[in-house]
Amino acid sequence: MPRLNVSKQTLYKLDRTKSYGTLDDVITGAIDTALIREQWDQLVRVAASLRNRTAPAHVVLRRLASSAPSDRLAKALTALGRALRSLFLLRYIHEEELRARIIEQLRARGETITNEELARISPMAFSHIIPNGTYFARRTSDLHDGPRNGHVSPVGAGTDSDM
């Protein structure tokens, strides 16, 4: 299971001009909150489309990944993600109870946690995701009668007759 190494994470602040005292040494970036405000309606629309399943996640990700570097929506989504990750990391560092709950959940799932790993506990809740895994796929034409324009589906996905 991947682990979160807090010491290697970049922390971002919401206000470039505000001083956070001793945290200024570890907060190395700043969030463009004006961009998030500008694109807020579009961000909500993307989230609603994903939640209501009117747009498949792979389509949204493909669109964002293939967008130009100047795409303001993609930049706003990245900035929002950095802000949320920074908030979580700061909570994780500050709240001993949160760290204890995470450790307890991992141990309840049978995870072995060493003392070295305690500082790098992952917030990921999806153990079925293998970030560096190998994935196999076969053409849908192998699963159905007739070609499907070369689309692929996960191995193990069968036709209705397989169920």
Image (cartoon, rainbow, N blue to C red):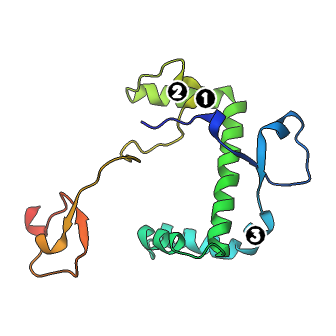
- Kind of residue sitting beneath label 2: Ile
In the figure, 54 relative to 119: above or below? below
Q: Are marks 1 and 3 in contact (CB under 8 Å)?
A: no
One can see residue 30 in this view: yes
- Residue under label 1, please give it: 99
- Kind of residue sitting beneath label 3: Leu
Image depth: mark 3 or mark 2 in front:
3
The disc, 1 or 3, on the residue closer to the chain's N-terminal end is 3
Q: Choose top left, top right, bottom left or bottom right for residue 120.
A: top right
Q: Secondary structure at mark 3?
A: helix
Q: Nearer the viewer, residue 46 or 116?
A: 116
In the figure, 31 relative to 43: above or below? above
The disc, 3 or 2, on the residue closer to the chain's N-terminal end is 3
One can see residue 143 in this view: no
Spatial CA distance of label 1 from label 3 is 32 Å
Q: Residue at x 91, y 49 (%)?
A: 18
Spatial CA distance of label 3 from label 2 is 36 Å
Left or right of residue 154, residue 106 in this image: right
- Kind of residue sitting beneath label 1: Arg
Q: Are marks 1 and 2 in contact (CB under 8 Å)?
A: yes
Q: Choose top left, top right, bottom left or bottom right for residue 111.
A: top left
Residue 56 screen position, x and y as percent: 42, 72
Residue 163 screen position, x and y as percent: 11, 61
Image depth: mark 1 or mark 3 in front:
3
- Residue under label 2, please give it: 103
Number of other residues with Cα within 10 Å of mark 3, as a class: few under 14, some 14 to 19, many 20 or more: some
Left or right of residue 129, residue 34 in this image: right
- Residue under label 3, please give it: 35
Number of other residues with Cα within 10 Å of mark 1, as a class: few under 14, some 14 to 19, many 20 or more: some
Residue 95 screen position, x and y as percent: 70, 30
